Image: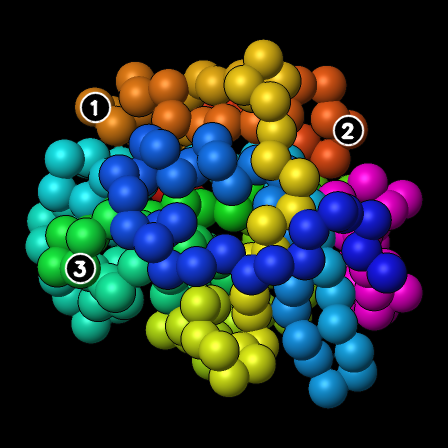
């Protein structure tokens, strides 16, 4: 069972707030992915906020597209994107409908269904690495673009939902620049993580890709 005192799903109004309020408040919450093989639950330990048109690092900075449409709401939905031609990453949409913002789920501790996560993350050296990074998290939970647009607040047993879990005390929360974000968006200290948690991914500044000669 999930080692948390509160299994109540988060309501939509939790997400219907500014992204910089929602992001740190997600730490310690429990994400449950229901699969045909059974549930996998993850205690969130690291996230990043992306603030739409106010944020050069956001997919929605230049407006709505077919790819980022889910980011415009309603809040409480799941935005999944495919990156570098090989990885998926998962976000939770927040803020008022019509204004794009989302929280990237960067890392967490698998607290239920570790045996299922291990089958998907065979390169992990230990359980602390199962969801240590956004692509690893999505892989461990079997998340892909098919789940883009999922309503995590639906009462009808959605494949992804967020439980109340145990919110983290403010003195345990750290923040700093977002990993790998370049340009003007790179200065925002909108990455949030639980201090000293071993599942948090290492920070890496943006490194431009070199063209092959």
Q: CA distance from mark 2 to mark 3?
A: 35 Å
**Which residue does the image show at 37% across and 60% down from the upper left?**
12
State which region is magenta. 109-128
Marks 2 & 1, CB-CB < 8 Å contact: no
Q: CA distance from mark 1 to mark 3?
A: 25 Å
200 left or right of 177 in image: right
**Which residue does the image show at 67% across and 31% down from the upper left?**
200
Checking the image for residue 209, the label placed there is none
- Label 2, secondary structure: give it: loop
The residue that label 1 is drawn on is 184
Mark 2 vs 1, N-terminal side: 1
Mark 1 vs 3, N-terminal side: 3
191 left or right of 198 in image: left
| The N terminus lies in quadrant | bottom right
175 or 18: nearer the eye?
18
- Of the two numbered discs 2 and 3 in the rendering, the one whose residue sits closer to the viewer: 3
**Which residue does the image show at 44% across and 46% down from the upper left?**
104
The residue that label 2 is drawn on is 198
x then y, percent, for residue 32: 65, 63
Question: How many other residues sit within 10 Å of disc 2, few (<14), some (14-19) or many (≥20)?
Answer: some
The residue that label 3 is drawn on is 97
């Amino acid at each position: 069972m999930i080692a948390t005192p509160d299994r109540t799903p988060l309501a939509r109004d939790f997400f219907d707030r500014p992204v910089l309020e929602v992001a740190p408040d997600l730490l310690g919450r429990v994400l449950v992915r229901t699969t045909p093989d059974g549930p996998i639950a993850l205690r969130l330990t690291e996230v990043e906020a992306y603030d739409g048109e106010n944020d050069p690092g956001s997919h929605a900075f230049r407006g709505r597209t077919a790819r980022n449409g889910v980011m415009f709401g309603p809040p409480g939905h799941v935005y999944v994107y495919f990156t570098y031609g090989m990885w998926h990453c998962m976000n939770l949409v927040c803020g008022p409908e019509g204004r794009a913002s989302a929280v990237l789920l960067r890392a967490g501790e698998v607290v239920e269904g570790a045996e299922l996560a291990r089958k998907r993350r065979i390169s992990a050296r230990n359980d602390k690495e199962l969801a240590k990074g956004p692509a690893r998290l999505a892989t461990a939970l079997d998340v892909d673009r098919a789940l883009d647009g999922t309503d995590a607040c639906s009462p009808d047993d959605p494949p992804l939902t967020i439980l109340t879990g145990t919110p983290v005390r403010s003195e345990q929360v750290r923040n700093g620049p977002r990993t790998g974000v370049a340009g003007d968006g790179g200065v925002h200290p909108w990455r949030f993580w639980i201090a000293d948690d071993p599942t948090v991914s290492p920070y890496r500044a943006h490194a431009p890709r070199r063209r092959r000669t």
